[in-house]
Amino acid sequence: MEQGRSIVHFVNVGKTYDGERLIVDDLSLEIARGEFLTLLGPSGSGKTTTLMMLAGFETPTRGQILLNGQEINRLAPHRRGIGMVFQNYALFPHMTVAENLAFPLNVRALGKAEVEARVIRALDLVKLGGFAARRPAQLSGGQQQRIAVARALIFEPELVLMDEPLGALDKQLREGMQYEIRELHQRLGVTIVYVTHDQAEALTMSDRIAVFDQGKIQQLASPTELYEKPRTSFVANFVGDNNLMAAEVDTLRSDHLCSVVLEGGAKVIAVATDELMPGQKVMLSVRPERLRLDPDAGAGTSSRLKGVIEEIVYLGDHMRIFVRTANQVRFLIKAANKEPHHGLTKGGMLTFGWSAQDCRALPV
Amino acid sequence: MTVTAITSPDDSRSIKRELTRSLRRRKLQAFVLVAPLLLFILFMFIYPIGGMLLRSVYSPDFARAMPATVAAIAEWPGSGTPPETVWAGVARDMLALQQRNEAGPVAAALNVEMSGARSLVLKTARNAGKLTAPYREAMVTLDPMWNDARIWQAIKRLSSPVTPRFYLAAVDMKVDEAGSIVSQPEDRQIYRSLFLRTLLISGVVTLCCLILGYPVAHLLANLPLRISNILMIFVLLPFWTSLLVRTTAWIVLLQKQGVVNSLLVWSHVLTDETRAELIFNRTGTILAMTHILLPFMILPLYSVMKTVSPVYMKAARSLGANQFVAFTKVYVPQTFAGVAAGCLLVFILAVGYYITPALVGGESGTLISNMIAYHIQKSLNWGLAAALGAILLTAILALYWTFNRLTKIDIIGLG
Ligand SMILES: Nc1ncnc2c1ncn2[C@@H]1O[C@H](COP(=O)(O)OP(=O)(O)OP(=O)(O)O)[C@@H](O)[C@H]1O
Ligand SMILES: [Mg+2]
C-alpha cells in the first residue's frame, strides 16, 4: 500500500498495562483511506486496547502509530480529529440531542448558524429529524445509537472508531443498524475502524477483517477470504462454524494439495494452506455446509466418512446434523432444506463426504 | 387447615373475609414495627417543634396573672386612659399577685414593653393593700406614671394571649407606644444583622467545603477501590472523634500562643507583637466549621461522582474538547445533583450550628443559634427564642424547597 492511500499505520505496536503481559503484541497494520476495517476477536484479545491507542486514550508501550504519515503516539485525543462511537453510546445525559450534536462543533468554535444547519443535517442523516429537543434518556436504544453515530460524524472526521457500537441492541435492531452504518460509510466515504466480537456482524459489514487473538492479528483479509480460506485453526473456528480434525501431513503434492493421515488412520486429500512439511501436525477444517450427505451422487467428492447420527436439529431453511465417527470425532453437517432428506433418524448410520478443495490443512 | 377449591358463593365470601383478616393482621404488624419510631418522632420532634411554634405567638402568662384587668380592658377602645373599672381590675390583680408573691414576672413582661414599668408594677403591688376606691386617684397618687396612656396601651397589648411581638422582636421591630409597628432604635438592633451574619458565614463555610471537597470527592470516585477505601477512612475519621475534641484542637492550634502563630513567628512571618487573631472571631468560626462539615460535602459528592462513567470524559475528548472543557462542560454538570445535595446539607447544618461558634466564635463569630440558646438558658425569653427558631426553620424550609425544585428539574433531565 503506498503512502497516500493508507490513513493509519501501526508499526510494531506493543502494549502492556502491567509490564508483564503484552495485551497487544507486535501489531503491524495498515488501514486504507475510506476502508471499513473490523477488528474481530474473542473477549480480552486486545481489540479495545488497540482502538484506545488509536484514539489517544492509551499510549503504546512500544512501536509507532502513524496517522496520515505523522506519528501520533503522544498526541492528545482532542487533537487527533478522530470520531468515536462507544458501546453504551456515551451521549451526555445533561444535554439534549441537539446540544450533544452541537458539542463537537461548539468546541471548534463554529458559527451559530453553521452549527444549527449542521445539526439539522446530521439529524436528517440518521433519520431522527424531530428529536432535537429530547434528552438521551427519552430515546430508545437504537435511537441513542444513531445519535451517537451522528455525533461522531458531525465534525466530519476522516476516521471514525466504533467499539462494539451495537453490542447493547437486540438482534433485529442490530441488523437494521448494521445496514445503516454500512450505508453511511459508503455515502460519506469515511474510514471506519469497527470493533466487534460478533463474527456475523464482521462478515456482513467489513471491507477487511483483522482477526485478533491474544494481542496478535491471526489473519487480515476480506470477509470472503477469511471464511473460505482461513489461515489458522483459530480463525477457521472463530469465523463461522467449522469441523476440525487432527491430522498429520503425509505427502505434499504439486497442486497446493497434500495428503494427510487422520488420527484413525484414514487418508484424506486437503488444500495445503501454508508451507507444510511431511510429518507436520495439522488441523483439517471443513465447513459444515460443504459436507455432502450423498457423497456418491455429486462429482468431486474425494473423501468420505461414516458415523452415527447423534442429533438432528431442524431450523426451517436448513438442518443441523451431528454425527460421531468411529474414532469419536464429532461432525456438524448443515444440510440445506432443498429436497426432503429421507432416512435420517437419530441413531442411524450416515455416510458423508467432501471435496478436497473444501478441506483445508491448517498448521497448529 | 386443608386447601380446597372455591366452589360456592358462600365459600368465596368466607375466603374474602379470611383475606381481609390476614391483610389487617399484616397491616397491624407493620404498624407495630414502626410504632416505636412513630412515637419517638411524635414526642421528640413534632410535639416540641409544634410547642415551640405555638410559644412564638401564644403567650398567655400575663393574661393568666391579671384576669380582672384583662376582662375589664377589653371594653376600652385604647385612647387616653381607661375607665375606672380597669383601674379597679389592676388594683385587684396587684393585690392578688402580691399575696401570691408573683408580681415579678408581670413586672418583667411589662418592662419589655415600656421601660420603667418594672418598678412601677412592683411598687404598686407592694402598696396594693392600701389602695382604695376610687382607684384612679389612689394609683396616680402612688405613682404619677399611671397617668401615662402608654402604660395602659402596653397592658392592653399584653392582655391578648396571641401576640406578634416575639416575631417583631426577632426582626428588630416593635409596637411602639402609639401602637404602630416600628424598627427598634439602631443601638438595640441585633437580630437582623445576626441573621445576615449567620447566612453569610454559612454561605462562606459551604463554599469553602465545596472548593475543598470537590477535588477530594473526584479523586475518591476515580481511584482504584483499594486506595479510595483507605482515603475514605481519612474522610470519615473526624466522625469518630468527638466534636468537642476537634473544636478544642482548633483552639490549641489557632490561639494567639498556639501552634500556627508560634510557627509563623518562628519563621519570621510575624513577630510576637503581631500574632494573628485566628480564633474567637469570624475566621475561627469559618475555619472550624469548614473542617467539621467537610465530610458532609464530600460524601454526597462522592456518591454522585461514583455514578458518572469515565466514558463521558473520553467521549468529550474524542469530540475535540480539551481536558478543561470536557471537565467543565461534561463532567461538572453531571455532578450538580451531588453539589446541590452537599451544599444544602452543609448550609443547613451550618445555619443551625451551635457548639463550634459558641466555643471559637468569640464576639464576631457567634450565630443566631447561640442567641437562641441564650434566650432559652439565660434570659428565659422563650417566646423570642421560639420566634427566632421559627424564622430560621422557615428560611431553611424555603431554601430546601428551592433547591429541591432546582435539582428535580435537573434530575428529570438526567432521566
Ligand atoms: N486499564 C487496564 N489496566 C489493566 N489491564 C487492562 C486495562 N484495560 C484492559 N486490560 C486488559 O487487557 C486485556 C484486553 O482488553 P481489551 O479491552 O482490549 O479486550 P477486548 O478485545 O476489547 O475485549 P472485549 O471484547 O471483552 O471488549 C484484558 O485482559 C484486560 O483485562
Ligand atoms: Mg472491548
Image (cartoon, rainbow, N blue to C red):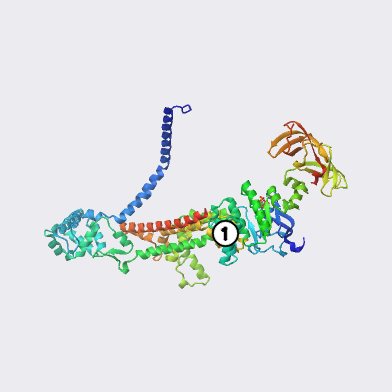
Residue at left 51%, top 69%?
B264
Q: Amino acid under label 1?
A: Asn
Q: Quadrant of residue A67?
A: bottom right
Foreground residue among A341 and A214: A341
How many numbered circles does the render carry?
Answer: 1
Foreground residue among A129 and A37: A129
Q: Is residue B162 left or right of residue A257?
A: left
Residue at the spot of label 1: A100
Give how far across and how far down residue B47 sits, in percent: 35, 49
Q: Is residue A150 left or right of residue A232?
A: left
**Label 1: which secondary element:** helix
From this viewpoint, which residue is outermost toward the front? A339
Give how far across and how far down residue A56 sits, in percent: 66, 60
Q: Is residue A162 left or right of residue B237?
A: right
Give how far across and how far down residue A235 sits, in percent: 75, 48
Does the image show residue B380?
Answer: no
Foreground residue among A52 and B61: A52
Does the image show residue A175?
Answer: yes
Residue at left 51%, top 62%?
B211
Whether ligand 2 has any atom under 8 Å from the Cβ at mark 1 is answered as: no
Q: Quadrant of residue B146?
A: bottom left
Q: Quadrant of residue A92?
A: bottom right
Q: Is residue B8 left or right of residue A45?
A: left
Give how far across and how far down residue A14 sits, in percent: 72, 57
